[in-house]
Amino acid sequence: MAHDELHLQTRNLELRDYPQLRELMDRVYDDIGGAWPRDTIKHMIEKFPDGQICIEDNGKLVAVALTARVDYQRFSNPHTYDDLVMKNDRILYNPEGDTLYGLDVFIHPDYRGYRLGRRLYDARKELCRSLNMRAILAGGRIPGYRQYADEMNPAEYIKQVHRKEIYDPILSFQLSNDFQVKRLLHKYIPEDEKSKGYATLLEWNNIMFEPPSSVLESRKSQVRLGAVQWQMREFNSVDEVLRQVEYFVDALSDYKSDFAVFPEFFNASLMGLTDQTDQTKAIRFLAAFTEKFRDEMSQMAVSYNINIVAGSMPLFEDDRIYNVSYLCHRDGRIDEQRKIHITPHERRDWVIEGGNELGVFDTDAGRVMIQICYDVEFPELSRIAATQEGGVDIIFVPFWTDTKNSYLRVRNCAQARAVENECYVVITGSVGNLPRVESLDVQYAQSSVFSPSDFAFPHDAVMSESTPNTEMIMFSDLDLDKLKVIRAEGSVTNLKDRRPDLYELKWRG
């Protein structure tokens, strides 16, 4: 058949198509009883018209997909084809069902090679997403098994088909369409001699599925974040710094941001109010204000209805100094992340010690973690978080760097973490000069938001970035649903394709 003679149209099946459908089913399923009665098809079209999909060529029916609506809990467990058939050959339809069940897909033999089956499967997947269904299930025949029944059991046959050592006309196709074998079904269609009565229970998960919940309980998928590229300046009091913080929080809140992100040690200029000759005393002087900053910024988070990543500050506890960041939720909760990897400067001049805990925090706008500056240069931390149940959507990196080369270490590592872990990474730092404050004489920063590198994201995987070395606020809108898609169906799937059979990563903290 010449390609220029084709005129393919995908549409929903109608009852007037039954004569052609019967002829096609009789031809394709001559070994297992042929076509369904007209009343069966009529019932399916009346009860679930969207689920009955066909392709016609110049008015001729050439491909059909028949679909039922079922309960996942019931049909994800062992069952037979007859469990889907009610009295008078009517197909089960559960109007409250949370799952699509693929009953049949059949293609006219003359049209095999045009990938019409893939079109029908794609249409089913789109229907599953649009109806917010949990999954697509299907009992898949294995007609090629008859040739190997004397050599191997069905489980071994399925394994070899999966490894592409054996080709099965149905199972090979379903595996190529992202279906996973959930279990082996016995006596699924007893009269199916080619499959010896066996079938595979296949499942395609809808990664976009959202369990029913009230609007107020649902987690946002469209997230706006605002980052503050902070100007280091001389301040005469804690209240003066807090007024500057509140100015930025107010501005970001006006633009409906879900997060306000501040840099590492953004309040460090307050060390200029004490003796600079002893840096250990100076950092402890600064730590005396940390509780006030934490409480005041938590109050701002509630008052301005915005989650605040409170940069980082020194924390004095049990005669030790830690570098700590607070996540101030807009519902009043406060989470804490201590910097785990301490730079030589912090250890030498300020005697800062590393924390021992790694947190992934649930917010009303995604699952997030905080890696303070140097921490993002250690890929193990973000990988541990990404491989937890639920993963991580956004990694916040408050940083403080003095030169461009030190900034580029943070930037390049942060961008790698976004690619490796299929998440967003936000970095924000400080700018400006403070020659009269030890260790704050120069700063270099260009705050940025990085994404995974795939078609759904910017070509350079940079969502947004600020002007270098200029105080400003930066916004970026993030789509968390895109992360779900790339993790399941991306051009590459870094998290799925790890080799735990060869290596593993353990947290011992």
Image (cartoon, grey):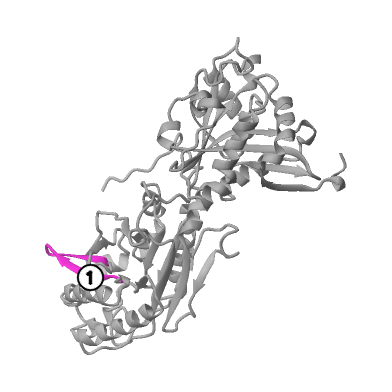
Q: Position of residue 488 (x, y in %)?
A: 52, 47
Residue underneath mark 1: 314
Q: Where does the magenta region start and end?
A: 311-328
Question: Is residue 271 rendered magenta in the image?
Answer: no
Residue drawn at (45%, 34%) of the image = 501
Residue 247 against residue 346 in the figure, above or below: below
Position of 344 with respect to 87 (left or right) is left
In what quadrant of the picture does the N terminus appear?
top right
The quadrant in which residue 283 appears is: bottom left
> Outermost residue toward the top?
150
Position of 233 with respect to 240 (left or right) is right
Position of 212 with respect to 292 (left or right) is right
The kind of secondary structure the magenta stretch mainly shows is strand
Residue drawn at (47%, 69%) of the image = 477
Q: Position of residue 244 (x, y in %)?
A: 30, 85
Tell me which amino acid carries mark 1.
Answer: Pro
